């Protein structure tokens, strides 16, 4: 089996999870989710962006456009 130190990897999705202990969903939305969305909004390779705010947790999923 061949091994590489830095193998080529094709990413089709990126998942970001941020723990915010004690924060309600509205606080997570405003303090975390909105900031992440704004930071990556203009990245041309992002095809779809989905985010969910939970009690104490933000989950952001970005789908990468493979043709970009």
Image (cartoon, rainbow, N blue to C red):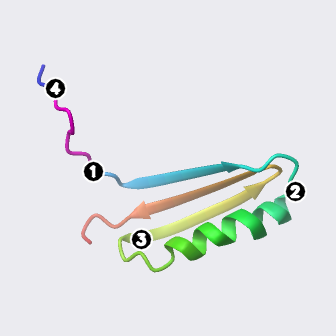
Q: In this figure, which residue is indicated by the disc labeled 2? A: 24
> Marks 2 and 3: in contact by CB < 8 Å?
no
N-term mark: 4 or 3: 4
The residue under the point 75% across, 66% down is: 31
N-term mark: 2 or 1: 1
Residue 34's spot in the image, x, y percent? 68, 72
- Which quadrant of the rendered structure holds the N terminus? top left
- Which mark lies nearer to you, 4 or 1? 4
20 relative position to 6: left or right: right
Read off the magenta span: 4-9
Q: Which mark is residue 3?
A: 4
- Which mark lies nearer to you, 3 or 2? 2
Q: Residue placed farthest to the left in the image?
A: 2
Splitting the image into 4 quarters, where does residue 4 fall? top left
Judging from the image, what secondary structure is the residue with disc 4 in?
Answer: loop
N-term mark: 3 or 2: 2
> Marks 2 and 4: in contact by CB < 8 Å?
no
Q: Which mark is residue 10?
A: 1
The residue under the point 83% across, 59% down is: 25
Q: In this figure, which residue is indicated by the disc labeled 3? A: 47
Residue 57's spot in the image, x, y percent? 74, 50
State the residue in front, 7 or 10: 7
Q: Is residue 66 magenta?
A: no
């Amino acid at each position: 089996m061949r091994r590489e130190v830095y193998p080529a990897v094709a990413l089709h999705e990126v998942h970001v999870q941020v723990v915010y202990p004690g924060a309600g969903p509205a606080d997570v939305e405003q303090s975390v989710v909105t900031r992440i969305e704004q930071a990556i909004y203009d990245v041309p390779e992002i095809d779809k962006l989905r985010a969910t705010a939970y009690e104490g947790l933000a989950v952001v999923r970005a789908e990468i456009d493979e043709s970009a």
